[in-house]
Image (spheres, helix red, strand yellow):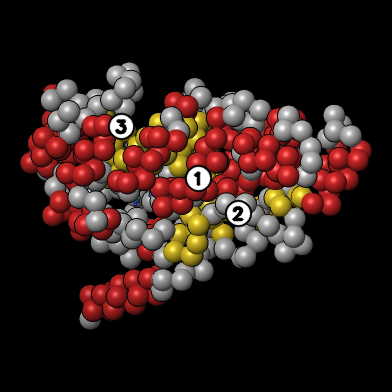
C-alpha cells in the first residue's frame, strides 16, 4: 500500500524497487533512478533529498515537492541486561509498536512487528490480549529495520553484530497484512537496500493457509509456523485461527512449501505450557502429524505476562519432550529466553494499541473478576 501523507506527498520509504521505478516513470523520469534513491534511503540512511548528490538539482526539487521520507518517532528505547534492545515506536496516529533486537555471538536478529496489535487472540500471547487496531504500512514495517540499523551501529561497543537476520515475529500476523509485508520483504532482500539473504529473513505465521500458498509464490524467504498444539481440539483452544484452518490443511501446505528444495525446512514453534501441551503423549502426536513435513522444532519456554493463568513447563519436562522428538529424528532446539527483564521476550510485546476490538477491556474485566473471586 502506498502511503500518502496529509500534505499529499508520497512516502518513498515504503516503495520497493518495482514501485519506486513506477513512481519515477509516473513523474517523467528514468526507472534507473529507483536504484539510486533506494541506496540513498536504505543503504546510506539519507532522508533529505538535498543530500542525494548523484541526482540533479532539478530532480531533487521535484522530489521535495512531490515526495517525502518519513519515519516513526522513537518514543523509548532500552537495553535488557542480556543486551537485548527494545524500541517503542510512535506512529503518526498515536499508536505504538515494539521492535526488538537480539544480539548473539555470531548474529544479530531484529524482531519486527507487522500490525498494531493482533486480531488472532492466541490464548498465551499478550499481544493478542491487547486487541487490534490496524495493519502497518510498508513504510512502517521497513522503518523498524531502517531505525535499528542506524541506532545499533552507534552502539557498537555493546553489540558486536548489527542486524544480520530479520524475523517477522513481533506484534501481529504478517500474513493478514500480506500486501504490505511482501514489499517490505523485497526491500530486506534487495542489494540496493539491506541485501539480507533469503535464509536470514523469516516470516512467522499462526497458519493462514491460503496466504501461505501465496507467500510461496511471491517470495522465497524462510518460514516459521506457530504450531503450539498437536491436535485440533487443543489447538482450537490456544490458537483460535485453527478453527478456520485446521491442522490437516496446515500440514498439507507445510508438506508442499519447500518441496522443491530439500535443503530447506520449516521452523515449527511450540510454546511450552505446563500441563497443557507438554506431555509425552503430546510429543508422540506431534511426531505423527509432522510425518512427511520437513520441519525443525523450536520449543519456546512460555513467557508469562500479567493476568495469565498459563505457566512455563519446567526444564525437566521440556528436556523430556525434546528427547522424544529427537529420538524420532526431529531436529529440536530450545529457545533461550531473551530480554524478559524489559518485557521484550516472545509474546510480551504490547506497544500501545488503541484497541478497536475492545478485547483488552473484556480480558481485564474477566481476569479482574477472577482475581477478586480468588481473594475472597
Ligand atoms: N502471528 C505470528 C507472528 C507472531 S510470532 C505467529 O503467530 O507466528 C510470535 C511468536 O512468539 C509465536 O511463535 C508465538 O506463538 C510466540 N509467543 C507468543 N506468546 C508467547 C509467550 N507468552 N511466551 C512464549 N512465546 C510466545
Q: Which mark is residue 181?
A: 1
* Residue 317 visible here: yes
Q: Total of numbered circles in the picture?
A: 3
**Quadrant of the image occupied by residue 243:** bottom left
Q: Is residue 236 left or right of residue 117?
A: left
The residue under the point 34% across, 39% down is 213
**Residue 49 pos. (x, y %):** 82, 42
Spatial distance from mark 2 to mark 1, Cα to Cα?
18 Å
Which quarter of the picture shows residue 4? bottom right
Q: Position of residue 110 (x, y in %)?
A: 52, 38
Can you tell me whether the CB of the residue at mark 2 lies under 8 Å from the nearest atom of ligand 1? no
Q: Residue at x 41, y 74 (%)?
A: 358
Give me the C-alpha separation between circle 1 and circle 3.
19 Å
The answer to the question of whether label 2 and label 1 lie on touching residues, with beta carbons closer than 8 A, is no
Please identify, in this view, whether the residue under mark 2 or under mark 3 is nearer the observer. Answer: 3
| Disc 3: which residue | 257
Which residue in the protein does label 2 denote? 89
Q: Secondary structure at mark 2?
A: strand
Crowd rating for badge 1 (residues with CA inside 10 Å; few <14, some 14–19, many 20+) = many
Which residue: 63% across, 46% down? 14
Q: Quadrant of the C terminus?
A: bottom left
| Disc nearer the start of the sequence (1/3) | 1
> Eyeballing the image, is 88 above or below 217?
below
Q: Secondary structure at mark 1?
A: helix
Name the side, left or right, on which 141 lies relative to 4.
Answer: left
Pick the residue in front: 69 or 280. Answer: 69
First along the sequence among labels 2 and 1:
2
Left-right relation of 322 to 147 = left
Element type where label 3 sits in the image: helix
> In the image, 232: left or right of 107?
left
Amino acid at each position: 500500500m502506498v502511503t500518502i501523507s496529509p500534505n499529499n506527498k508520497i512516502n518513498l520509504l515504503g516503495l520497493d524497487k518495482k514501485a519506486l521505478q513506477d513512481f519515477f516513470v509516473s513523474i517523467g523520469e528514468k526507472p534507473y533512478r529507483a536504484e539510486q534513491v533506494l541506496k540513498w534511503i536504505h543503504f546510506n540512511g539519507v532522508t533529505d533529498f538535498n543530500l542525494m548528490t548523484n541526482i540533479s538539482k532539478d530532480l531533487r526539487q521535484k522530489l521535495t515537492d512531490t515526495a517525502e521520507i518519513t519515519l516513526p518517532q522513537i518514543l523509548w528505547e532500552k537495553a535488557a541486561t542480556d543486551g537485548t534492545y527494545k524500541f517503542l515506536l510512535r506512529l503518526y496516529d498515536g499508536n505504538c509498536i515494539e521492535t526488538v533486537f537480539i544480539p548473539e555471538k555470531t548474529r544479530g536478529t531484529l524482531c519486527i512487528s507487522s500490525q498494531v496489535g493482533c486480531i488472532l487472540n492466541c490464548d498465551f500471547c499478550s499481544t493478542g490480549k491487547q486487541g487490534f487496531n490496524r495493519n502497518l504500512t510498508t513504510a512502517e514495517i521497513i522503518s523498524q529495520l531502517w531505525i535499528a540499523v542506524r541506532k545499533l551501529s552507534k552502539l557498537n561497543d555493546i553489540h558486536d553484530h548489527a542486524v544480520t537476520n530479520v524475523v517477522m515475529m513481533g506484534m501481529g500476523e504478517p500474513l493478514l497484512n500480506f500486501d504490505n509485508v511482501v514489499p517490505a520483504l523485497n526491500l530486506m532482500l534487495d542489494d540496493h537496500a539491506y541485501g539480507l539473504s533469503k535464509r536470514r529473513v523469516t516470516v512467522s505465521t499462526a497458519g493462514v493457509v491460503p496466504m501461505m500458498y501465496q507467500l510461496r509464490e511471491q517470495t522465497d524467504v524462510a518460514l516459521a509456523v506457530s504450531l503450539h498444539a498437536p491436535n485440533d481440539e487443543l489447538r482450537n483452544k490456544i490458537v483460535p485461527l485453527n478453527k478456520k484452518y485446521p491442522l490437516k490443511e496446515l500440514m498439507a501446505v507445510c508438506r508442499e512449501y519447500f518441496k522443491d528444495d530439500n535443503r530447506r525446512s520449516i521452523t515449527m514453534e511450540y510454546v511450552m505450557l505446563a500441563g497443557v501441551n507438554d506431555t509425552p503423549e503430546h510429543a508422540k502426536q506431534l511426531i505423527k502429524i509432522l510425518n512427511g513435513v520437513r520441519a525443525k522444532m523450536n520449543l519456546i519456554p512460555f513467557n508469562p505476562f500479567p493476568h495469565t493463568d498459563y505457566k512455563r513447563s519446567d526444564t525437566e519436562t521440556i528436556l523430556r519432550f525434546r528427547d522424544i522428538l529427537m529420538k524420532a529424528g526431529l531436529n529440536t532446539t530450545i529457545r533461550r529466553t531473551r530480554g524478559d527483564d524489559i518485557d521484550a521476550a516472545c509474546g510480551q510485546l504490547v506497544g500501545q494499541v488503541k484497541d478497536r476490538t475492545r478485547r483488552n477491556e473484556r480480558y481485564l474485566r474477566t481476569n479482574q473478576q477472577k482475581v477478586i473471586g480468588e481473594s475472597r
